[in-house]
Image: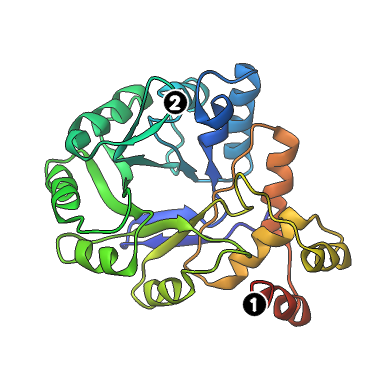
Amino acid sequence: MNNDTLTLADDLELTRMGYGAMQLAGPNAWGPPRDRAQAVEVLRTAVDLGITHLDTSDYYGPYITNEIIREALHPYPADLRIVTKVGFRRGPEGTWDPAPKTLREQLHYNLDRLGLDVLDAANLRVPGPGSIAESFGRMAELQKEGLVRRLGLSNVTAEQVAEAREMAPVVFVQNLYNLAHRTDDALIDSLAADGIGFVPFFPLGGFQPLQSAVLAEVAASLDATPQQTALAWLLHRSPNILVIPGTSSVPHLRENVAAADLHLPADALDRLNHLAD
């Protein structure tokens, strides 16, 4: 596998093809997985394939995904970087509820269940537009206390990114972005110019999987799947993009990782670049 790495903030080195652990819990990241042993195998295979960027959150399950990560991988490989998210909690019926007042507790939940003394990085998940000064300011304080080394943002606007950067360095932004949803094109380019990573969530469409005749045609011409082609396009889109496709299947994991080796010729890139027009 030719999985390039990206170094952020001088010391956070991540493979650009990472793994998102959300699907290791039950449907809609709620409850236990159907096959816990398979979830453990997926994680161990990801590390065996050279992935060093593992994305998670204690609200996946809740708690279950982090517990599986610890079971599968602890003590962790020296080069593995675990990136988590805080800012939300799960309601009793599986709802996703903003929780900006309990960030300290959320970081400790992640630390305890992952078996860590300090988190490599944590994203503040933002519920929507508006000032994030209070919540990100709290994250900056918790970073100074030594609970987390690096800070990121999730589900934010360019204005919120700028506001956060006035308070503390931001190493990456995690937003919805894929071939069909390209609202953040300008943001990606501005972040790249400043050495900040961009991590697309739902890189394959999420709950609405990508479907396109053009994508299917390009994939067929490359002897690849549409999903591999969509991931390869993201890696070609900008050098600051890191992808974290999730799966609970080892064969699907191997298929996703193989996208790091997929070369997109100029004519294929041109067709895909215009897919959202």
Q: Residues within 10 Å of mark 2 (few under 14, many from 20)?
A: some
Mark before the other along the chain sequence, 1 or 2:
2
Q: Amino acid at mark 1?
A: Asp
Q: Is residue 131 above or below residue 99?
A: below
Camera-nearest residue between 156 and 2: 156
Q: Is residue 272 above or below residue 112?
A: below
Residue 200: image x %, image y %?
A: 50, 57
Q: Which quadrant of the figure has residue 84?
A: top left
Residue in the image at 76% along x and 77% along y: 265
Residue 55: image x %, image y %?
A: 46, 42
Residue in the image at 64% along x and 53% along y: 204
Number of numbered discs visible in the structure rendering = 2
Q: Is residue 66 above or below residue 118?
A: above
Residue 94 numbered tag: 2
Residue 233: image x %, image y %?
A: 65, 67
Residue in the image at 52% along x and 36% along y: 21
Residue in the image at 74% along x and 46% along y: 255
Is disc 1 placed on a helix, strand or loop? loop
Locate residue 88 relative to residue 42 in the image: left or right: left
Locate residue 20 relative to residue 115 in the image: left or right: right
Which residue position holds label 1? 277
Locate residue 232 relative to residue 71 in the image: left or right: right
Mark 1–mark 2 Cα distance, whole angstroms, equals 36 Å
Residue 242: image x %, image y %?
A: 51, 58
Q: Is residue 200 above or below residue 34?
A: below
Q: Which quadrant of the figure has residue 158?
A: bottom left
Q: Which quadrant of the figure has residue 25?
A: top right
Q: In what quadrant of the picture does the C terminus appear?
A: bottom right
Q: Residues within 10 Å of mark 1 (few under 14, many from 20)?
A: few
